[in-house]
């Protein structure tokens, strides 16, 4: 049984103690819940892959309390320092060259010469990182190929009995994962659109090259697709069990509806992401919506989910990325 720890001083201290002992503890960040392990402990990192049932060793993000701590393990470029100054703590992950004396276990970076680092803003994540005093490797706290959890109930649905504990932080305010930006090449590459929107990054990075989730998937205007897929970027990811149809302009008799704005006529089962068409509200409800509809639609005897179109701008880029992956099977 996985223990649910309260996010008070005693809960944080117990979570840090468990991590130090090599155990797995899930914790909230402003994006989604992560399964944490001591990033410097290869055996603890290996246990993450076992708990997730990951088919292979994808590189993980290491989390830090401060940019100073992150840049002790990852070699910052000038741009990395500028982005850290503007976006950390926050939903941005930077892929950088492994620094000399980097403490991160090779398994956490899947043997790559680069490391992914992030300073989360969530107060519980911050408190845990300060108590632990080592980097915490944390992928999203879901079983491999499933939707990321944004509440403790989702974490338990995915991982009860497979991790030692979870810190209870309520709902994650952003609801989609961090933006992953690769700064190891000649120009920055957007490996995953996420909580830090491309429009806010562009003044620092210039136009961003994005890796498409699937060949031919629509990208935002101004984003070019070099067609190179990053390690760990499986096309089919975040998948609900029922088939998902995107950009629906009508809903079939056998379909549940993931609505954005006034719901399409005739839907028997609707999950509203945002009636007011607010992208931040929709991002925060996205994974909960996919989970809820997946279960409720199957119970109601429906055979698929139709998703209404969502603008491909701001957080809509991350929302469409996750929906495209969920639809790909
Ligand atoms: O919001 C988030 O980022 C959450 C919370 C818990 O921080 N974490 C998360 O981790 O989404 P995960 O493991 O589900 O996704 C990490 C992403 C993967 O797409 C992986 O391929 C990429 O980061 N990544 C990590 N290290 C990398 C590296 N060295 N080079 C390229 N991509 C890397
Ligand atoms: Mg994930």
Image (cartoon, rainbow, N blue to C red):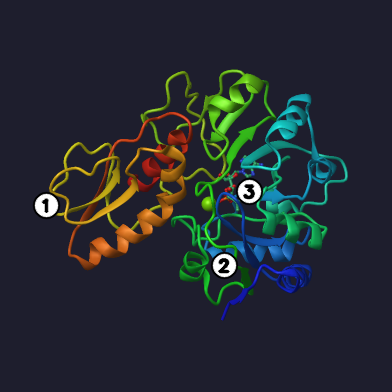
Q: Earlier in the sequence, mark 3 or mark 1?
A: 3
Q: Position of residue 247 (x, y in %)?
A: 27, 36
Residue 218 circle label: none
Dot 2 lies on which element?
A: helix
Q: Earlier in the sequence, mark 2 or mark 1?
A: 2
- Residue at the disc numbered 1: 253
Where on the picture, by quarter, is residue 107? bottom right
- Residue at the disc numbered 3: 59
Q: CA distance from mark 3 to mark 1?
A: 42 Å
- Residue at the disc numbered 2: 51
Q: CA distance from mark 2 to mark 1?
A: 38 Å
**306 up-or-down from 140: above or below:** above
Q: CA distance from mark 3 to mark 2?
A: 15 Å
The residue lying furthest to the bottom in this view is 1
Q: Position of residue 108 (x, y in %)?
A: 69, 53
Q: Which is in the foreground here, disc 2 or disc 1?
A: 1
Q: Position of residue 36 (x, y in %)?
A: 66, 61
Front residue of 293/58: it is 293
Sort mark 2 into few (<14), some (14-19) or many (20+) by Cα contacts within 10 Å: many
């Amino acid at each position: 049984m996985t223990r649910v720890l309260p996010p008070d001083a005693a809960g944080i201290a117990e979570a840090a103690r468990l991590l130090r002992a090599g155990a797995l503890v899930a914790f909230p960040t402003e994006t989604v819940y992560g399964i944490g392990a001591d990033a410097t402990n290869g055996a603890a990192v290996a246990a993450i892959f076992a708990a997730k049932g990951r088919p292979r060793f994808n590189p993980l993000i290491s989390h830090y309390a401060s940019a100073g701590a992150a840049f002790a393990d990852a070699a910052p470029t000038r741009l990395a320092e500028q982005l850290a100054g503007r976006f950390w703590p926050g939903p941005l992950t930077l892929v950088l060259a492994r620094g000399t004396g980097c403490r991160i276990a090779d398994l956490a970076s899947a043997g790559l010469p680069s490391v992914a680092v992030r300073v989360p803003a969530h107060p519980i994540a911050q408190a845990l990182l300060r108590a632990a005093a080592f980097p915490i490797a944390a992928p999203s706290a879901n079983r491999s190929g499933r939707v990321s959890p944004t509440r403790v109930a989702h974490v338990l649905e995915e991982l009860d009995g497979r991790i030692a504990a979870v810190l209870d932080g309520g709902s994650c305010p952003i609801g989609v994962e961090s933006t992953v930006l690769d700064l190891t090449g000649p120009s920055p590459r957007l490996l995953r659109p996420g909580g830090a929107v491309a429009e806010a990054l562009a003044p620092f990075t210039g136009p961003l090259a994005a890796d498409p989730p699937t060949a031919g998937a629509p990208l935002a205007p101004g984003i070019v697709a070099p067609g190179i897929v990053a390690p760990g970027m499986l096309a089919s990811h975040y998948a609900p069990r029922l088939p998902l149809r995107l950009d629906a302009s009508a809903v079939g008799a056998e379909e549940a509806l993931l609505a954005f704005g006034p719901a399409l006529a005739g839907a028997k089962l609707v999950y509203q992401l945002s009636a007011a068409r607010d992208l931040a509200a929709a991002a925060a409800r996205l994974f909960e919506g996919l989970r809820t509809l997946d279960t409720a639609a199957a119970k109601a005897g429906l055979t698929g989910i139709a998703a209404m179109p969502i603008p491909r701008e701001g957080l809509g880029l991350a929302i469409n990325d996750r929906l495209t992956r969920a639809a790909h099977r």
